[in-house]
Amino acid sequence: MIVNETSLKGSYVLTLEPIEDERGWFARTYCKNDFLSLGHHKEWVQMNHSFTKQMGTIRGMHYQRPPYGEIKLVRCIAGSVYDVIIDLRSDSKTFLQYFGIELSASNKKMIYIPEGFAHGFQTLSNDAELVYHHSQFYLPGVEAGVKYNEPAIKIKWPLEITSISDRDNSHPLIDANFKGL
């Protein structure tokens, strides 16, 4: 797999390197030794799979509050999405900056998201599916979010928004009281 650090320290775009033959292809999506070189020492404790029907839908921007922060590894296995992460680490040089990338079944890219980041995406196709690995269990009551159109961050979503949940649309805007994670 090809590893490239993003502009937000500690986050990486990982591109699969399939081995192909007449039957199709095979690619490794995780190897403990490879991830140790990224500084990943935690166990994946939960895997989730999402399906989003409509192009233009936004899901996010989600995170879990400390001490329940989680590392995520996200891969699109059907369709395509514009995947976005926001650095919420108060001691980071890129605090409140975002990084966005297209993840698709065809480009075989994944994104590694360290603790202290919010995550979300906009579907660029109908019938988009994502698979997520998590280093922390989902814990109701510790989840939080950043509003998808937060003025302090100015995410440039590629498409007109067609759908967003009431929950995601109700995340509060960042104010002077927000100190980060």
Image: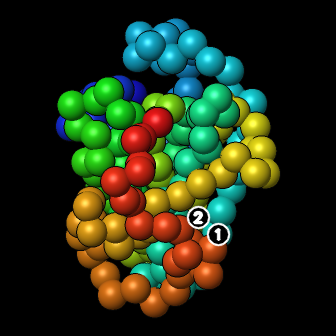
- State which tag comes first along the sequence, 2 or 1: 1
Q: Secondary structure at mark 1?
A: strand
- Taking the spot 34% from the left edge, 54% from the top edge, the residue there is 176
Where is residue 97 drawn, in percent x and y? Answer: 25, 48
Q: CA distance from mark 2 to mark 1?
A: 4 Å
Rendered position, 105 above or below 40: below
Q: Is residue 142 left or right of residue 88?
A: right
Report the amino acid beneath label 1. Phe
Q: Residue furthest front?
A: 177
Where residue 35 sits in the image (x, y, percent)?
Answer: 48, 18
User: Looking at the picture, does residue 21 appear above or below residue 135?
Assistant: below
The answer to whether any part of residue 95 appears in the image is yes
Q: Give the residue pinned by disc 1.
A: 51
- Decide which of 165, 23 is in the foreground and name it: 165
Which of the 4 quarters of the picture holds residue 151?
bottom left
Q: Residue at x 56, y 48 (%)?
A: 63
As displayed, is residue 168 above or below residue 177?
A: below
The kind of residue tagged 2 is: Glu
Label 2 neighbour load within 10 Å: few <14, some 14-19, many 20+: many
Q: Residue 160: image x %, image y %?
A: 33, 87
Residue 43 image point, x, y percent: 68, 21
Check whether the beta carbons of the residues at disc 2 and disc 1 lie within 8 A of each other. Answer: yes
What's the coloring here? rainbow
In the image, 49: left or right of 121? Answer: right
| Residue located at (38% from left, 60% from top) | 174
In the image: residue 40, left or right of residue 95: right
Q: Which mark is residue 28?
A: none
| The one of 88 and 105 positioned closer to us in this rendering | 88
- Is 71 positioned to the left or the right of 18 in the image? right
User: Which residue is disc 2 drawn over?
Assistant: 129
Q: Quadrant of the N terminus?
A: top left
Residue at (60, 41) in percent of width and height? 65
